[in-house]
Image (cartoon, rainbow, N blue to C red):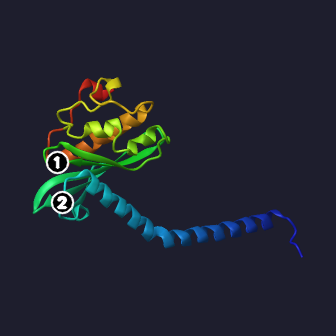
């Protein structure tokens, strides 16, 4: 026999449904939480390896939180060969998580985009290691170079039709360099008028 449709019965049914759904979501989250953490750690380790010269330690063991980023020190035969800095910046589609590798003198060794939500076929090209901004920043030292897009008077060609993503990427590099400079005591990044725009 069906219960009469009253406000009290509707509220009870809704509370029961929400409780069951919350319990299911909580259970699924607890089952996948460790796997998600392992996947993120593996992505971070792969990004560190991609942006630094060869090293023989585990930079994840030497992680430090500095400002808005995380910095990992890589060594080879107990000599520092570089620093990987993980930062977030905001592009056209939302957050971009990236890793920037610096040599001890502050020169950019390489970059890697770990996560993004940029437009496929446009801003998503930032994940391609051969796209203009990613290739062009390698070898630059942010304390000596104007790392802004050419459209803003800088030295770097942006991704065609993705100026916002290109600017965000270069802003992420500047943030990563700030973390590097604070951690190592290096000279701050170049803040020319073009960088202020």
Q: Residue 55 carries which label?
A: 2
Q: Does 188 sit left or right of 127 as displayed?
A: left
Residue at 32%, 26% in the rendered image: 150
148 w.r.t. 97: above or below: above
Q: Mark 1 points at which residue?
A: 103
41 w.r.t. 105: above or below: below
Residue at 39%, 33% in the rendered image: 159
Sequence-earlier tag: 2 or 1? 2
Q: What element carries label 1?
A: loop
Residue at 18%, 42% in the rendered image: 107
Q: Does 197 sit left or right of 62 as displayed?
A: right
In the image, residue 104 lies at what x, y percent? Answer: 14, 48
Image quarter (top left, top right, bottom left or bottom right) of the C terminus: top left
**What's the distance in space between the residues labelled 2 and 1, CA to CA?**
12 Å
Which residue sits furthest front?
A: 130
Q: Is mark 2 on a helix, strand or loop?
A: loop
Q: In which quarter of the image is residue 140?
A: top left
> Is residue 52 or residue 3 the one in the foreground?
52
How many marks do you count on the picture? 2
58 w.r.t. 184: above or below: below
Q: Quadrant of residue 172?
A: top left
In the image, residue 12 lies at what x, y percent? Answer: 74, 68
Nearer to us of marks 2 and 1 is 2
Q: Does 185 sit left or right of 121 as displayed?
A: left
46 w.r.t. 141: above or below: below
- Callout 2–callout 1 Cβ contact below 8 Å: no
Q: Can residue 137 be seen in this view?
A: yes
In the image, residue 165 lies at what x, y percent? Answer: 41, 37
Image quarter (top left, top right, bottom left or bottom right) of the N terminus: bottom right
Residue at 32%, 36% in the rendered image: 133
In the image, residue 129 lies at what x, y percent? Answer: 34, 45
């Amino acid at each position: 026999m069906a219960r009469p449709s009253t406000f009290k019965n509707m509220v009870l049914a809704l509370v029961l449904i929400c409780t069951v759904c919350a319990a299911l979501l909580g259970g699924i989250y607890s089952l996948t939480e460790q796997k998600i953490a392992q996947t993120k750690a593996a992505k971070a380790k792969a990004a560190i390896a991609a942006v630094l010269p060869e090293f023989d330690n585990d930079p994840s063991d030497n992680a430090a939180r500095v400002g808005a980023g995380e910095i990992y020190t890589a060594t080879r035969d107990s000599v520092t060969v570089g620093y990987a800095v993980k930062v977030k910046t905001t592009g056209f589609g939302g957050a971009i998580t990236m890793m920037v590798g610096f040599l001890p003198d502050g020169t950019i060794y390489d970059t890697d985009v770990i996560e993004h939500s940029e437009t496929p076929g446009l801003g998503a090209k930032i994940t391609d290691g051969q796209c203009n901004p990613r290739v062009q920043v390698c070898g630059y030292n942010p304390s000596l170079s104007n790392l802004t897009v050419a459209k803003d008077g800088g030295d770097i060609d942006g991704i065609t039709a993705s100026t916002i993503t290109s600017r965000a990427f270069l802003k992420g590099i500047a943030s990563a360099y700030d973390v590097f400079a604070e951690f190592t005591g290096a000279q701050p990044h170049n803040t020319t008028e073009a960088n202020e725009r």
